[in-house]
Amino acid sequence: MILRVWNNMGKAKLERFVMEEDLEPHDTEAVDATEVSPAPEGSSAQQEMSSSNAEEADVGFSASCLTTAELQQHWRAVKQEFRSVKLLFDIPTTRIIDQKISKYVVYQVVVIRSGSYDCERVAIERRYSDFLHLHQELLLDFSEEMEDIVMPRKKMTRNFSEENIAERRVALRDYLTQLYSLRCVRKSQAFVAFFTHKELKTSYDLLRGGRFSRALEGLQKVLVLQEKLSSHNPTLVVPTLCAILVCQRDLEDFDAAFQTGRRALPTVRRYELRQYQGPLLEALVDLGYSLGLPVAQLQDELTRIQDSPNELVSDMSLKELVVQEFV
């Protein structure tokens, strides 16, 4: 396990490991904080037990609660937190929307994970006014950090000429790249919301209206973007995963719904997301029974949470919890 590797590394080797993994300053501190002191020589069994206990303490729950697949998923997420995910932005195409009372340009924005082939290149569409709103919102919190970043100006004439549109397309692409280069900006809620808020709101409106197929399509698109943009905070994908589960269950794709719930559960446990834990476990137990799967462990966990006097468990079902989003 990753903590066991750190135990056997000296300070100099650890620093080189941090550099090789391209960690950011706050990530280096996280590594140092989780470093475990080695056990005395000749006590390998004790060292192994200590290391195992440290892992469970860091996770925030007993590893015995998880299946092998869930443990693998969890540790992939843990290791990802200590890496800086590099993203590239592209605006490959544009289109002009010509309505009776307005005319404007829509820019197709693509977020690409660098370092390996990214087969999930989800595209969104944004207007110049959306970029301007993002810039103004970021300036409220990061005016000093953004003093060298200039928002591309809108021209007074010939806004719809091919030359001006192509020029602004490149400028807006470079603008997103500059924003992303600022750690405080790329981890801000406003920056992530720029890429996901519109699609999320539309998807939740469709879900509340019972149009589950279209809602599912939009939510899956958003999930790809959230996973790329929010590696610093894995909890941001939990509401989206729960909404996807609700859509899949109402579309009677029970197996996919169960797998989606199992995907969300380790993060819910690790970060103690109480409002989701009870409803998610209840949904998984019901799905497991429908599929004929062994769910005794999940049922025991749900019962333990419900019977605990110190636990704040939501009385709502997972669907009731999900439909409250973006109301």
Image: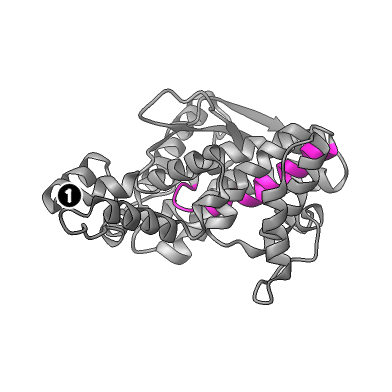
Confirm whether residue 23 shows in the render.
no
In-front residue for pair 322/107: 322
Name the quarter where the C terminus is drawn: bottom right
In-front residue for pair 142/211: 211
Q: Which residue occupies 72% across, 45% down?
A: 295
Question: Which segment did they paint magenta?
Answer: 230-250
Give x and y (percent) for residue 103: 69, 36
- The type of residue carrying mark 1 is Glu
Residue 235 magenta: yes
Confirm whether residue 34 shows in the render.
yes
Q: Which residue occupies 64% across, 64% down?
A: 274
Describe residue 212's horizontal placement relative to residue 266 as left or right: right
Q: Which residue occupies 46% across, 46% down?
A: 231
Name the quarter where the N terminus is drawn: top left
* Colouring method of the image: one colour
Give x and y (percent) for residue 204: 76, 47
**Magenta region, main secondary structure:** helix
Give x and y (percent) for residue 77: 46, 44
Describe residue 25's horizontal placement relative to residue 280 as left or right: left
Which residue bears the numbered disc 1? Answer: 15
